[in-house]
Amino acid sequence: MGGGALGSDSATFEPLPRLGYLDQLLKETLRLWPTAPAFNVAPFEDTTLGGRYEVIAGQPILVLLPQLHRDQAAWGEGAGVFDPERFSPERAATIPANAWKPFGNGQRSCIGRGFALQEAMLFLAKLLQRFEVTSADPGYTLQIKHTLTLNPERLYINLRRPGANIAAPTHAPSAPARPAFPRVRPGVRSWSGRLAASGASAAAAGSGST
Ligand code: HEM
């Protein structure tokens, strides 16, 4: 798909609506592996949830997203299967309200939702437009690293630019001239302490002392 909607153009906002399948991919990925796997809610008044669970006002309830997002009552028997077609325009309308909540709920829901999805779509579109993507380890099975967020552990990919030939150099390339690193404008005093600590020369840091 990569080159299709974007062509060879630079990434801009306009083609995003035409990249619908990427949107479906992202939504289905966030369903099975929600980056932020839980959030809290609390009722304003005493209530009974689903006719079964008594909850008093203010009592925190943890919404565990991997559980909600794989609930067969909402997603069917194949709830554990990765299927971006669930979010196709035809089928998305049949998803029960509140069954998909990777960005939280209500007043405390994510203010970065639009930005995060747009950024991820643009990144994916540009990546697929420019590179052939393959798994670096075809035998890899998903392992989740669980910190505050969920991440795939040691998942690596290979990127290859179509048409690019990578040949071993016939002679050792000469090192390009490099400026001293880090580059600091002479007289920028606030950096000199850190530079001294990392072993950079005092000359690179200017003559100031902090
Ligand atoms: C895929 C990316 C993201 C996911 C899955 C995500 C998920 C969430 C979730 C579940 C919450 C609710 C937390 C709670 O109720 O305890 C939340 C809140 C929030 N998110 Fe995100 N987020 C993402 C990206 C972003 C980005 C890019 C920004 C900022 C540019 C952002 C800013 C915020 C802020 C400020 C809140 C707190 C809102 C409030 O409490 O009023 N998020 N996010």
Image (cartoon, rainbow, N blue to C red):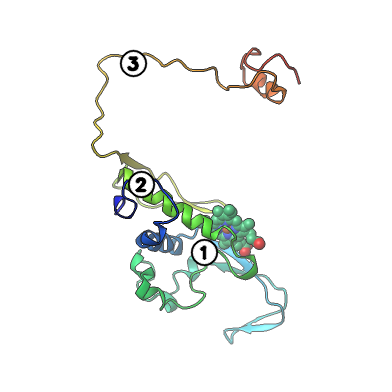
State whether residue 205 is above or below residue 70. Answer: above
Marks 1/3: CA–CA distance = 49 Å
Which label's residue is closer to the chain start, 2 or 3?
2
Give the left or right position of residue 100, taking residue 21 as reference.
right
Q: CA distance from mark 2 to mark 3?
A: 33 Å
Residue 77 is left or right of residue 38, and the answer is left
| Residue 102, numbered circle | 1
Mark 2 = which residue?
A: 9
User: x and y percent of residue 164 in the render?
Assistant: 26, 34
SS for dot 2: loop
Q: Eyeballing the image, is 112 above or below 164?
A: below
Secondary structure at numbered mark 1: loop
Identity of the residue furthest to the right in this view? 210
* Whether label 1 touches label 3, CB < 8 Å: no
The residue at which mark 3 appears reads as 173
Residue ID at (44%, 77%)? 74
Is 157 situated left or right of 107 in this image?
A: left
